Image: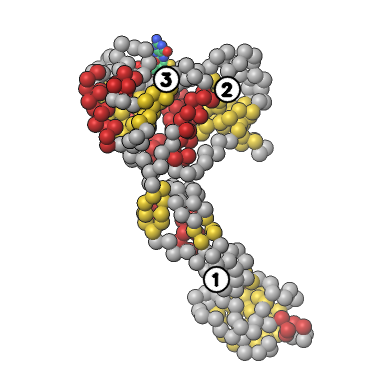
Amino acid sequence: MITFENAFEHVLEHTLDFGDETVTLLKSTGRILSEDIKADRDFPPFNRSTKDGIVIAFSAIEKGITRFKVEGVLSAGMPQQKLSTDHNCLEIMTGAVLPEQADTIVMYEETAIKDGWASITKTPKKGQNIHRQGTDEQKGAILLKKGTEITAAVIGVLASVGKKDVLVKTLPKICVVSTGNELVEIQETPLPHQIRKSNSLSLASALKKVKITPTLLHIADDKSIIEKELEKAILKYDVLMLSGGVSKGKFDFIPDALHNLGIEKVFHRVAQRPGKPFWFGVQKEKQKVIFSFPGNPVSTFANYHVYFLPWLKKSLGTETKNPSVILDEPIQPHPSLTLFVQVTCHWHQGKLIAKTIKGNGSGDLVSLALADGFIRVPQGDNEILQGMVFDYTEAG
Ligand SMILES: Nc1nc2c(c(=O)[nH]1)N[C@H]1C(S)=C(S)[C@@H](COP(=O)(O)OP(=O)(O)OC[C@H]3O[C@@H](n4cnc5c(N)ncnc54)[C@H](O)[C@@H]3O)O[C@H]1N2
Ligand code: MOO
């Protein structure tokens, strides 16, 4: 049995590269950019008005002029115009191009306009209310770096530089495998000794959040069928994500089956709870990775978030940013196991505060639905006092 720290390191040593692909702009939401994005023009591309009002030449103010003849109206979308003389002004709308011979914008609230004449009611500062060309970014500047996660705000930047199609990291093809004769489909009514499959659906839902649609495969607890089905799946997918069948039971065939199929075991069993019987293996030549999680629902769920997500992010060239949280109660560590304890979190005075959820062990999947994530409690003998800081993995 290895420590959590060792197991985590091993998982991150076996990342894969699935290459790049081009997708249309909106389909790139939630994906990872695979190219630097440069400004195709200055941001903003012209001197733009930031207020609705009038535009004047400040030289008029210096001459003591405060009343101007209105010679026209400028709206956003009009090509650049020209102010004919500093005795005149133009009405200008937010987003319109600053006209030639003008340099100062006075918002309507600081003017009085009557019969084609505008008076200024508050002395302006030279150059006010203008968003100058190139002050946000200059043409050619890198706006977004390769490895950036594409959020809604990033989509806005991509759109503004005309990225109709975006180069993103290709996602792995994943097969989520469940095993166990006790499991029935969710639409079925289980007999008293049966349960509905939930792990595979929960994993599929978690994968959807990272834009991966896995294939679901269920295999009965039969050694030769398990081997045959896994052999086919390994050929077809980059990643197998299994739940169940990795412990010490008479029907826990998965580790042997994977061994017989030539998958190299990196580790089996980690000094942690939940998720202790986790099996992790690779087939280096064919670039395959196998996450074989313990079947108890909390174990599967915790291990997916603690190990798989950081592995995926690293494989896609981006980082996992896990915050720390303050635990609002004392906690007793385990003398030899790292604990992943379910918590709810809330913000209080700028700090993320966690409270534990009293679950009923790693088979209690209902308590999972109440949790925001897990804190990691390192092994130890002495009670940890209230107010200590822990690493936190969001899981929902
Ligand atoms: N002698 C020992 N027994 C057990 C040990 C041990 O160290 N020595 N470890 C325990 C721990 S910890 C865990 S966790 C479980 C994991 O066992 P398996 O990975 O072999 O999982 P199964 O036995 O197949 O199932 C466990 C439990 O989870 C339910 N399950 C499985 N798959 C699903 C699914 N897709 N959806 C919903 N529920 C699922 C299954 O019905 C069982 O109740 O082993 C302990 N035993
Ligand atoms: O360590 Mo197991 O994964 O909780 O029951």
Left or right, 123 with respect to 392, comes to right
For the residues labelled 3 and 2, the Cα–Cα distance comes to 21 Å
Q: Residue at x 27, y 15 (%)?
A: 192
> Is 388 situated above or below 248?
below
Where residue 90 appears, as percent x and y from the top left, is 61, 83
Indicate the amino acid at tag 2.
Val
Instruction: Return the x and y of residue 309 as percentages of the image width and height.
Output: 45, 35
Q: Position of residue 255 (x, y in %)?
A: 34, 20
Q: Is mark 3 within 8 Å of ligand 1?
A: no
36 or 365: which is nearer to us?
36
Residue 228 in view: yes
Q: According to the image, label 1 marks what residue?
A: 45
Report the residue marked by disc 2: 377
For mark 1, give the secondary structure. loop
Q: CA distance from mark 2 to mark 1?
A: 52 Å
324 sits left or right of 304 in the view: right
Position of 186 relative to 58 (above/below)? above
Q: Which residue carries the number 3 mark?
A: 268
* Identity, as a three-letter code, of the amino acid under mark 3: His
Mark 3 neighbour density, 10 Å: few (under 14) some (14–19) many (20 or more): some
Judged from this view, the residue extending furthest toward the front is 285
